[in-house]
Amino acid sequence: MTQLFDHIEYTEDERTCLELLSKYDQKEQRAILSDIIGSVRASKLIRAFEYRITNIHLAVEQPFDPHNAAAMVRSAEAMGLIHMHAITTNKEVFNAKATTQGAYHWMFLSYFKTTEKLYTHCKKRNIAIAACTMDGETPINALDLSKPTCLIFGNEHHGLSNKALEEADTRVCIPMYGLSESLNLSVSAAICCYALSTRIRNTEGASIPLNAEEESLLIVRALLKTRRFQHISHFLASYMK
């Protein structure tokens, strides 16, 4: 695995299947998916994979309510995003199944113990960091998307930490015109996901799609949701022999 998977959470079964799947090119991998889960469902998944946007990441700092964090995952997946990060020691924070409705299967989830570790991770990969805060100077629709960007949200009670705000590349806000002073965390994330994904899809060449490794991991997850690991690993080991 490359550094792409350094922080992505995946299981040993996924790792084993990825190693087996790597023997085949993209066309063969898609054929394997179709052979196992059926052509209709495979076509639907492949279309969804092709709509993925990899150059917008979402992050949340020390989320208090796991249902809010899980709702962020669901909104991000629905808008075609793929990368979601949490600054927390609780690796179950995104897994409220009743809230995500299984969306976490199709997202690349990462966990960092500190804000500094997430920011270092992003900066090493040339990912800009945009802090979402009520007093941000840049409206979300005006955010510069010329490079990959991680949009970070704060805790429901305390917002973003001083460190997160000070070390971000920019601060963004959601313009509001009513009397409410703030929005729920998951609602804010959903609005931003929609605004940014729409801009990217409406701008030719702005979207960075999945690369081969990323699509392979999603294919493995689709296979393992359909069949037992033993069946999948045997099928991959013997396919086209």
Image (cartoon, rainbow, N blue to C red):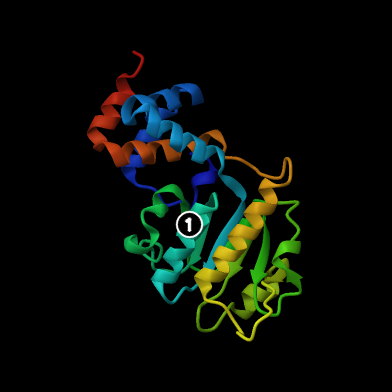
Residue 158 lies, with reference to residue 127, above or below; the image says below
- In the foreground, 199 or 125: 199
Q: Residue at x 39, y 68 (%)?
A: 90
- In the foreground, 117 or 152: 152
| x then y, percent, for residue 36 | 32, 28
Q: Residue at x 51, y 60 (%)?
A: 85
- In the foreground, 102 or 85: 102
| x then y, percent, for residue 83 | 53, 53
Name the residue carrying label 1.
Answer: 110
Q: Residue at x 49, y 22 (%)?
A: 27
Residue 130 lies, with reference to residue 6, above or below; the image says below
In this rendering, position of residue 141 left or right of residue 9: right
Residue 196 lies, with reference to residue 14, above or below; the image says below
> What's the amino acid at mark 1?
Ser
In this rendering, position of residue 204 left or right of residue 219: right
Location of the C terminus (image quadrant):
top left
| x then y, percent, for residue 9 | 42, 52
Q: Residue at x 63, y 53 (%)?
A: 197
